[in-house]
Amino acid sequence: MQMNDSQRIPASLNQVWAALNDPDVLKQCIPGCQSLEVTGPNEMTATVIFKVGPVKATFGGKVTLSDLDPPNSYRISGEGSGGVAGFAKGGALVRLESEGADMTILHYEVDAQIGGKLAQLGARLINSTATKLAGEFFKSFAEVVSARAEAS
């Protein structure tokens, strides 16, 4: 499954880049995120409670940042296991575009794969849930970064 979109964020390019690399901001914005901890350069571990239709599971996994081009773009990738619910893995190519001193456009291209019990729920339900979760993350991210930019 793949999707792409963009989000306008009323903050400078550098403020948005800093937030994209801040585990506290990411944890706050990832739907269902229980923990997100830095484990090494460009690596984090995460625990996320994920619900798709009737299946609810806690996923534990690893998040990696790669293809870093500060402050313009990076790839964020993750994979996790939810026990009997199955597995999820995917990533997003995130690209920032400055539109003036206090406006940044965040472009993203997301790809995801799932397996196990989750995959049996049907592509339409999975796609709509994934689209909703990605939308929630980027909307929340824009709100958090915007509030931080206003405060500084």
Image (spheres, rainbow, N blue to C red):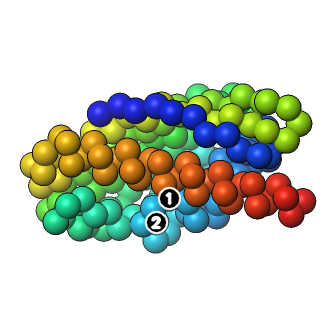
On the image, numbered disc 1 is attached to which residue?
A: 30
Mark 2 lies on a secondary structure that is: strand
Q: Is residue 118 left or right of residue 131?
A: left
Please name the residue shown 72% across and 54% down the image: 145
Give the number of callouts. Answer: 2
Residue 103: image x %, image y %? 79, 39
Q: Amino acid at mark 1?
A: Ile
Residue most extreme to the bottom: 34
Of the pair 34 and 4, the residue shown nearer to us:
4
Residue 151: image x %, image y %? 86, 63
Q: Say if 32 sits above or below 65 in the image.
A: below
**Residue 147 at least partly seen:** yes
Q: Is residue 66 left or right of residue 115?
A: right
For the N terminus, which image quadrant? top left
Q: Amino acid at mark 2?
A: Cys
Q: Quadrant of residue 57?
A: bottom left
Please name the residue shown 85% across and 41% down the image: 102
**Residue 116 at least partly seen:** no
Of the pair 53 and 20, the residue shown nearer to us:
53
Residue 33 is marked as 2
Q: Say if 1 sits above or below 126 in the image.
A: above
Mark 2 touching mark 1, by CB under 8 A? Answer: yes
Mark 1 lies on a secondary structure that is: loop
Residue 133 is marked as none
Of the pair 20 and 138, the residue shown nearer to us:
138
Q: CA distance from mark 2 to mark 1?
A: 5 Å
Residue 94: image x %, image y %? 58, 34
Please name the residue shown 90% across and 59% down the image: 152
* Mark 1, other Cα within 10 Å: few <14 / some 14–19 / many ≥20: some
Residue 36: image x %, image y %? 53, 63
* Mark 2, other Cα within 10 Å: few <14 / some 14–19 / many ≥20: some
